[in-house]
Image (cartoon, rainbow, N blue to C red):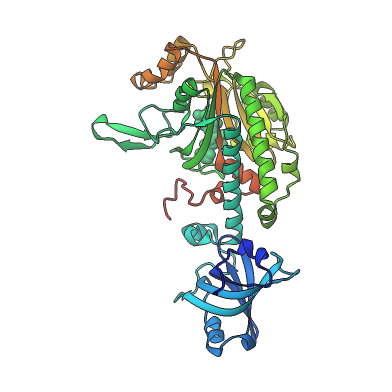
Amino acid sequence: MSAPWVEIKNLFRHEGREVVVKGWMYNKRSSGKIHFLQLRDGSGFIQAVMAKSDIPEETFLEAKGLWLEASVEVTGIVRKDERAPSGYELTVTDLKVIHNPEHEYPIGKKEHGIDFLLDNRHLWLRSQRQRAIMKVRDQVIWAAREYLHNEGFLLTDSPILTGSIGEGASGLFEVPYFDEGKAYLAQTGQLYAEATAAAFGKVYTFGPTFRAEKSKTRRHLTEFWMLEPEVAFYDHEDNMRLQENLVSAIVKNVLEHCGRELKDLERDTSVLERVEPPFYRITYDDAVKMLQGLGSPIEYGTDFGGDDETILTRQFDKPVFVECYPKKVKAFYMKQHPEREDLVLCDDLLAPEGYGEIIGGSQREDDLDLLFSRIREEGLPEESYDWYLDLRRYGTFIHSGFGLGIERLVSWICGLHHIREAIPFPRTIYRLNP
Ligand code: 4AD
Ligand code: MG
């Protein structure tokens, strides 16, 4: 019987037996009589030890001539080894080279500049660090969907090509659209989630969203993934409770399943371990006073800049909600504050350690006339909101929801310096390739 093909992460189940590993050689050390081949297959990393005395001469020579990132099939016996990071090692009995590159691998051991790495993103993804980040991203998405599914939410996907502007007229990507004129790439799935909330109660959308903002910060992408729950009969308070429960569940799940990856990323997990409801709450009014007290030049009535969020979140050891912003800095659909006409019932959830906004949410304006006048004030094309206003014409209802930016959350959980590492192929204003 020939040896079975086993994924590296499952090798521990095959101790003492001969197996086949299929993958790439990401590093190699050699002494005259032994090659140490570092292998990866996507599921994990393992060292394969090839002794000259154990295999035919030509196989040993072939291994010597391997370039980094050669694809290989290695047959070997699984051995326990306390010193190995995975706890196991492979004693090689055979090697089949699938492809030995003709050139040296572009990403070497030396420090590379970020532009070089981004130009080679398709290769950079093979590194241990990038694998750890992508694994956390996968777990974040899995955990979010699991939580919402268990809470009875229905996933109702929203269109990417849209006729109504979701957030604001600035920052739209336009696409020519047959006889209809132009379409926009969705900035949000929210308006559609409001319609499906009226149909199904608790819903969420999850997909790519687009912002043509010329923001060159470490928090902005032009294409990012947003998870947007929307709930019928939830008010502003219910909405914030859902947010803190969801974020806590995601962080807990990642801590449980991605310990190894967080370690690879050298993440200090003590902050993450504190993430439990209730989160801190502060009103916009108080946040402005706090910022001014800390020396920020912010003026009352304006939105926070990235620096303000950084300063603010450093004052808290857990995520903090900033509630009730001035109407004029927020989107048209937010519900007017019952006691303060100049404010809206909204919240931004800011992650600690300087990370800043990871969620934007609000109770929605359910009054037909108020909503219509806000659409007018913002100069939005009224005809494309007729369907949206129907939600207020036929059984209007208190409802609330929010958008969680997946890359912002992954950046914080992984402790990344820049959001561009939180998505496989980042899109920023300067980058469309690879
Ligand atoms: O605050 P935003 O703009 O809210 C909305 O789009 C609402 N329609 C959501 C809703 O209520 N259903 O965006 C929500 C979140 C932000 O908190 C942030 O995490 C992320 O989306 N986000 C971005 N992430 C990366 N790059 C950008 N340019 C982002 N803009 C927003
Ligand atoms: Mg926002």
Does residue 380 appear in this view? yes
Looking at this view, name the residue that lies furthest to the left. Answer: 179
Quadrant where the image shows the C terminus: bottom left
User: Quadrant of residue 404 in the image?
Assistant: top right
**In which image quadrant can residue 327 be found?**
top right
- Residue 296: % across, % down: 67, 32
Q: In which quarter of the image is residue 181?
A: top left
> Which quadrant, please, contains the N terminus?
bottom right
- Can residue 418 be spotted in the picture? no
Which of these two is toward me, 351 or 19?
Answer: 19
Find the residue positioned furthest to the front: 1
Residue at 64 percent of width and 65 percent of height: 11
Residue lying at 59% horizontally and 86% vertically, measured from the top left:
55
Residue located 73% across and 71% down the image: 81
Residue at 66 percent of width and 26 percent of height: 241
What percent of the width, then of the height, locates residue 246? 63, 34
